[in-house]
Image (tube, helix red, strand yellow):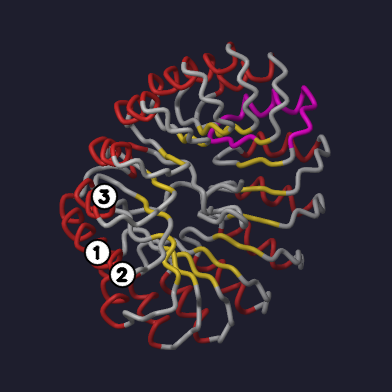
Amino acid sequence: MGWFEQNGTRDAPFCQAENLCKPKNTSVRGLAMLLTQVVPNGSGVQKFYFCACEKAFFALRRNGSGVQKFYFCACEKAFFALRRNGSGAQKFYFCACEKAFFALRRNGSGAQKFYFCACEKAFFALRRNGSGAQKFYFCACEKAFFALRRNGSGVQKFYFCACEKAFFALRRNGSGVQKFYFCACEKAFFALRRNGSGVQKFYFCACEKAFFALRRNGSGVQKFYFCACEKAFFALRRNGSGVQKFYFCACEKAFFALRRNGSGVQKFYFCACEKAFFALRRNGSGVQKFYFCACEKAFFALRRNGSGVQKFYFCACEKAFFALRRNGSGAQKFYFCACEKVFFALRRKHRKTRLRLTVLARTGRRWPDYLRIEN
């Protein structure tokens, strides 16, 4: 969560290999240098996110970091290095890394969580070998999901992205699964509501119709994740849901509605929502956690108003980060995505910094879709 384990955003997430995992040759050397600098200094960092950064990964393994979580995007060679060295890592996130996954299964890793993005063959290998893994994250893996259901896995958490057919299979078999993550799966959601599943958490991405169905049926769901779903959000506010957490992606109008209604919500996640953020600050919300994606202006507003916020999550916000450091904010946690220059500046200026850098740098331009997902 971990992108977020206790807060619903650190363990990530959906990863779209076609958008987030494209090799960026310019960053490989930089991140490799970064790791060789950070690890010997005893940073205590426990999580690393890799996107086409094999050299950086080798540097990490050579120095014996003790890292427990690895996130891979098209980094097969790096993964093989991890397995050969017997790292004991318990969580793996795969994006288009089928060969790497096969290596994991052959070596009997005992890993309990697997995150898949367009890795159908890898999933079949997992099921055949009886892994006992309890959590699966699917992105465009319908065939793999069918295999899971047929084998009666007992898995309790599923993350869906454009997998309507897979979802129908889940509902027909009466799985008892308690968490569902939807991306462009309106039909699947309707099926869930009709069957009275008792599910308590829903993650929506461009699923307005599905959300309306949820509200009409009085589901009692307490957490909602929105991405480009303004109409759905208005419906939520009108019905007085009592929901306590909202995750916004390009939903400025929805956010204004939230503030006007005095919701008392304590956590907000922003992606390209500068105007919404200004509204939040003007209204003195007292919110303690902010997640930023390409929201530099909003960040400056936060610093000027002396918010006292303790956690900041950045995606492509270099200027905002410099402002944070200059003003001596006292913030204790920073999460970076595609901000290599900022990270180097941090290391140069504050080598003894107290910051706990739980996420270093990603090569993609955007934070993995939709926040990150709670355990």
Q: Dot 1 surroundings within 10 Å: few (below 14), some, or many (20 or more)?
A: many
Where is mark 1, residue-wise?
A: 34
Question: Where 36 sits versus 77, above or below?
Answer: below
Along the viewing direction, whichever of 71 and 254 lies nearer the viewer: 71
Q: Are marks 2 and 3 in contact (CB under 8 Å)?
A: no
Please name the amino acid that badge 1 sits on.
Leu
Q: Secondary structure at mark 3?
A: helix
Cα distance in 3D space between marks 2 and 3: 17 Å
Residue 261 vertical position relative to residue 8 in the rendered view, above or below = below
Q: Are marks 1 and 2 in contact (CB under 8 Å)?
A: yes
Image: magenta residue range: 180-199
In depth, the one of 138 and 352 nearer the eye is 352
Q: Position of residue 361 (x, y in %)?
A: 33, 59
- On whether residue 53 falls in the magenta region, the answer is no
Mark 2 lies on residue: 343
Which one is closest to the eye, mark 2 or mark 3? Answer: 3
Mark 2 or mark 3: name the one nearer the start of the chain: 3
| Helix, strand or loop for disc 2 | helix
Residue at the image position 35 percent from the left and 63 percent from the top? 316
Q: Residue 293: x percent and y percent? A: 44, 61
The answer for how far apart the CA atoms under marks 1 and 2 are is 9 Å
Mark 2 nearby-residue class (10 Å; few <14, some 14–19, many ≥20): some
Q: Residue at x 42, y 55 (%)?
A: 47
